[in-house]
Image (spheres, rainbow, N blue to C red):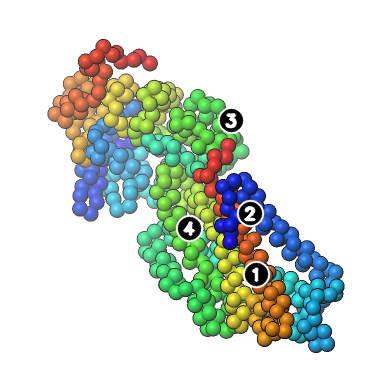
Amino acid sequence: MLHFDEITIRTSSRTLVDKVSLNVQPGEWHALVGQSGSGKSLLSRSAGQLLPPGLSAEGSILLEGTDLLGLKRSNLRSLLGRRMSYIFQDYQAAFAPFRTIGQHFREAIATHDKQRLREAPDRTSAALESVGLEGSLASRYPFQLSGGQLQRASIALALLFSPDVLIADEVTTALDSVSGHRVLSLLNRLRLETGCSILFITHDWRHVRRYTDRIAVMKDGRIVESGGTHRVLDHPRHEYTRRLIAAAPVLSRLPSGLQEAQP
Amino acid sequence: MIRLFKQPQTAMRYKLQLGTAVLTAALLLFLYIYTAFVLRHDSTLTNLSIRLQGSSLMHPLGTDHLGRDVLTRLMLGGRQTVGYSLLALAAALLIGTASGMIAGFKGGWLDRIFMRIADGFLAFPDMIVVIVLSGLLGPGLHSMITAIVMVKWVSYARVVRTTVITESRQDYMLAARINGLSPANMLSRHLLPHVAGQVLVLASLDLGKVILLISSLSYIGLGVQPPTPEWGAMLNDSRPYFQLAPQLMLYPGLAIVLLVLSVNMLGDYLRDYFDVKKEVRV
């Protein structure tokens, strides 16, 4: 589905991502874990040619046979948001402050599905309802929505055209743990409904264990270990993976009698 | 002067700002209609037998040194002044906004070229550049407007560019990109609303300056040429008669002050109105 082949990302002086290969299968939930600065986000952004100025990616990224890195901007634009979507940690800023939620949806439909622009209001409410929001929120401005609502709205927008791949970059980091779980179980339900694969960038092991099918662990721009979620979590082979798992806060290891809450 | 009216009671202040601007506009409009449809004097017809007269029913503000009706000339002059100011400002606004947006959005060498040109214009005081350009192109309306546009677009381009650069780094612009929006759409739909408020406010504050600039240029003989009425030119014309008929200088001077003041009030009002951060409008 989405295949990263020997991706190298470098500045003029430093190599930030070093020959990383990663394959996201159709319909699977693939986690990419690693500490801050390991190059996870850069790798995911390179797929949409969204790297900051001054950085360049080498190698090839194939989305069902189409090389994304070699695509012209205009061709890439017709693909972004339609066949490959992103959602980010900072959902607050993901909507333009001067435009209503509905206008954002309408704009996306006008970009990718102009013939059906008339149905935009209906599609917007349907999309908002599919993530558990009221359709009437479409007429609101971003600052009138809560953080959780905005994150759901951004998911609805990202999944509007049932993309093949959704890249979710630390989407739960800014949410409290209850909202985080809600958002992820929502993503999981939508994934099962639409069959899209998810590349999930995170450093929260609880989410990884619960939702993901496979894991790749990144360190200093390289993937040090990858495999099925339970294999990696229960029998980590690489020293770094072991340390990462050990460093994760797990309630059962706390000295007090607190138990991890079951949602 | 304007600071005098700035009370902490914001609602009162808004009303005062808007009220002054609206009242002045209404007064000027009334006087204009009165001169155009009731008095119906010819603004350029000279009649030396009635020169330098005081106020009368036929000539509410008297006549000037060539026997022309002062009120009629004041109103037509106002039309010229305001019209040309708006024209010059609109052109400067358009050029400045477009170049600022392109420079800020594209960046790189295009940005550098635009901004070096802008720096060049900024290095000289407005008035000097305008005078030199008017001098080079010859006195008259066209050169005056060209000169004002050439000086004024720079500040808009600068402001717009800075806003575009800061806003382009915001996540909603990234979000627009990942939704596949074209650069033209991103500029017009996501950045223009951000820029428009700021630039309109800046323009309304600038309108006063441009009115003064046009009047001053006409005053020193580089702007509107006689016998066309214009406030600055009227001031200039009446200089020799200052001791004989001081009201001839007073009226255009007063008109300039009043108009600039009310335009500034309007600018202040607009600035507060567009300031979304000030209050949450639900």
Using the rendered view, name the quadrant where residue A93 is placed.
top left
Please identify, in this view, whether the residue under mark 2 or under mark 4 is nearer the observer: 2
Q: Which disc, if any, is residue A136?
A: 3
Mark positioned earlier in the residue sequence (2 or 4): 2
* Badge 1: chain ID: B
Neighbours of disc 2 within 10 Å: few (<14), some (14-19), many (20+): many
Q: Which disc, if any, is residue B17?
A: 2
Give the amino acid type for the residue marked by disc 3 in the picture.
Ser
Neighbours of disc 4 within 10 Å: few (<14), some (14-19), many (20+): many
* Badge 4: chain ID: B
**What percent of the width, then of the height, locates residue B41?**
82, 76
Give the amino acid type for the residue marked by disc 1 in the picture.
Ile
- Marks 1 and 2 share the same chain: yes
Judging by the rendered image, the residue that carries numbered circle 1 is B256
- Marks 3 and 2 share the same chain: no
The answer to whether one can see residue A78 in this image is: no
Mark 4 and mark 3: Cα distance apart in space: 34 Å
Give the amino acid type for the residue marked by disc 4 in the picture.
Val
Going by the picture, which residue comes out furthest to the top? A257
* Badge 3: chain ID: A
Q: Depth check: give the residue in front, A27 or B114.
A: B114
Please identify, in this view, whether the residue under mark 4 or under mark 3 is nearer the observer: 4
Mark 2 and mark 4: Cα distance apart in space: 26 Å
Mark 1 and mark 4: Cα distance apart in space: 29 Å
Give the amino acid type for the residue marked by disc 2 in the picture.
Gln
Residue at (52% x, 72% y) in the render? B150
Q: Which disc, if any, is residue B160?
A: 4
**What percent of the width, then of the height, locates residue A173?**
34, 31
